[in-house]
Image (spheres, rainbow, N blue to C red):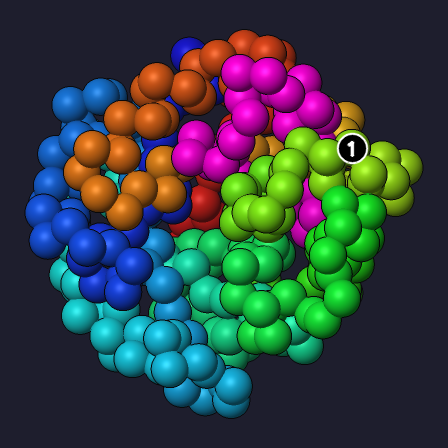
């Protein structure tokens, strides 16, 4: 079968940054069925009320808000999982309390929402090298927490929001590959998934090898991968079939390299 197309990180109109009312669970599922996806997971933004520190933007997006999409529509063609994308603020404590992970099939954690200055991005992180060290530290510190990593995805490692004022590829090149390999080996052993986000490959036409290098390190460390669109609008859903096959081919991924959400 090979590495199957899927979308395990996608937003509905419940996410405050999604301005497309057409982004409903039914519409997202219809696209997945039409493109023969292996699986699908809805992952709206979330900040748990039990965790202090939510910004004004995040505060309304609590567990009750995200759960209002339930029950999700059923499909005879593929599983449709219920998840969320929580936040990883500057203090390194996920914005979803440990006891509430059980409410979700899958939890996406972003280590690099660095456009959120203060909330996520510390003062003084203003060069590719400093950003590389900061994100690597955050990946390492997250791994040391007591979390159910077998149902966690590490989001958009090459996302443009990591260093919107400059080159993400430069940030990736500044990362210590040997240290990254040790960290990724830990994620592999813990059972976490590494995200291939088709919306998060800036500079693809000119710097694709630099961007892919971090995923090559993760593969060498034994990590499993999942694909996603991170779509916030209907028109963005097609980034998975448009780009993921090329990424899979260039990374040499097979069915054995594909992460799977654990069955309950």
User: How far from the left and from the top, in percent, is residue 17?
Assistant: 30, 59
Q: Which residues are magenta?
A: 187-214
- Determine if the magenta segment contains residue 190: yes
> Measuring 60% from the left and 75% from the top, which residue is drawn there?
118
Which residue sits at x=36%, y=63%? 45
Image quadrant in which you'd find residue 253: top right
- Where does the image place residue 177, in percent across and percent down from the top left? 85, 35
Q: Can you say which quadrant of the picture contains the N terminus? A: top left
Picture coordinates of residue 113 (x, y %)?
54, 58
Question: Can I make out residue 210 in this image?
Answer: yes
Q: Farthest residue in the front direction?
A: 165
Give the quarter of the figure containing the C terminus: bottom left
Residue 64 drawn above or below residue 113: below
Give the residue at x 44% y 15%: 245
Q: Nearer the viewer, residue 144 or 230?
A: 230
Q: On the image, which quarter does residue 229 sit in?
A: top left
Circle 1 packing at 10 Å, graded few (<14), some (14-19), many (20+), is some
Answer with left or right where residue 138 lies relative to residue 177.
left
Name the residue: 31% across, 74% down. Answer: 61
Q: Is residue 36 above or below residue 88?
A: above
- Which of the pair 44/122 is nearer the observer? 122
Residue 75 visible? The answer is: no
SS under mark 1: helix
Mark count: 1
Closer to the camera in the image, 132 or 248: 132
Would you place residue 184 above or below residue 208 in this image? Answer: below
| Magenta run includes residue 10 | no
Expressed as whole percent of the image width and height from the top left, the position of residue 20 reads 15, 50
**Residue at mark 1:** 173
Judged left or right of residue 264, residue 232 is: left
Query: Is 196 on the left-hand or right-hand side of 190?
Result: left
């Amino acid at each position: 079968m090979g590495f199957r197309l899927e979308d395990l990180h996608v937003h509905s109109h419940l996410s405050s940054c999604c301005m497309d009312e057409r982004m409903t669970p039914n519409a997202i599922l219809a696209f997945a069925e039409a493109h023969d996806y292996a699986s699908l997971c809805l992952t709206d933004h979330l900040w748990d009320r039990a965790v202090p520190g939510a910004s004004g933007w995040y505060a309304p997006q609590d567990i009750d808000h995200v759960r209002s999409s339930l029950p999700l529509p059923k499909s005879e063609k593929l599983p449709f999982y219920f998840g969320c994308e929580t936040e990883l603020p500057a203090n390194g404590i996920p914005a979803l309390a440990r006891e509430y992970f059980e409410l979700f099939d899958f939890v996406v954690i972003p280590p690099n929402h660095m456009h959120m200055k203060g909330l996520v991005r510390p003062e003084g992180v203003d060069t590719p090298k400093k950003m590389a060290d900061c994100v690597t530290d955050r990946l390492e510190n997250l791994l040391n927490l007591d979390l159910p990593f077998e149902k966690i995805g590490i989001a958009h490692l090459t996302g443009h929001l990591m260093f919107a004022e400059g080159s993400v590829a430069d940030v990736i090149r500044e990362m210590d590959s040997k240290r990254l390999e040790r960290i990724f080996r830990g994620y592999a052993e813990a059972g976490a998934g590494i995200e291939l986000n088709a919306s998060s490959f800036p500079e693809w036409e000119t710097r694709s090898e630099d961007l892919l290098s971090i995923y090559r390190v993760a593969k060498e460390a034994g990590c499993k991968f999942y694909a996603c669109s991170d779509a916030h609008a209907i028109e963005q859903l097609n980034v998975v079939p448009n780009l993921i096959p090329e990424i899979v081919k260039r990374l040499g991924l097979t069915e054995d390299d594909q992460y799977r959400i654990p069955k309950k």
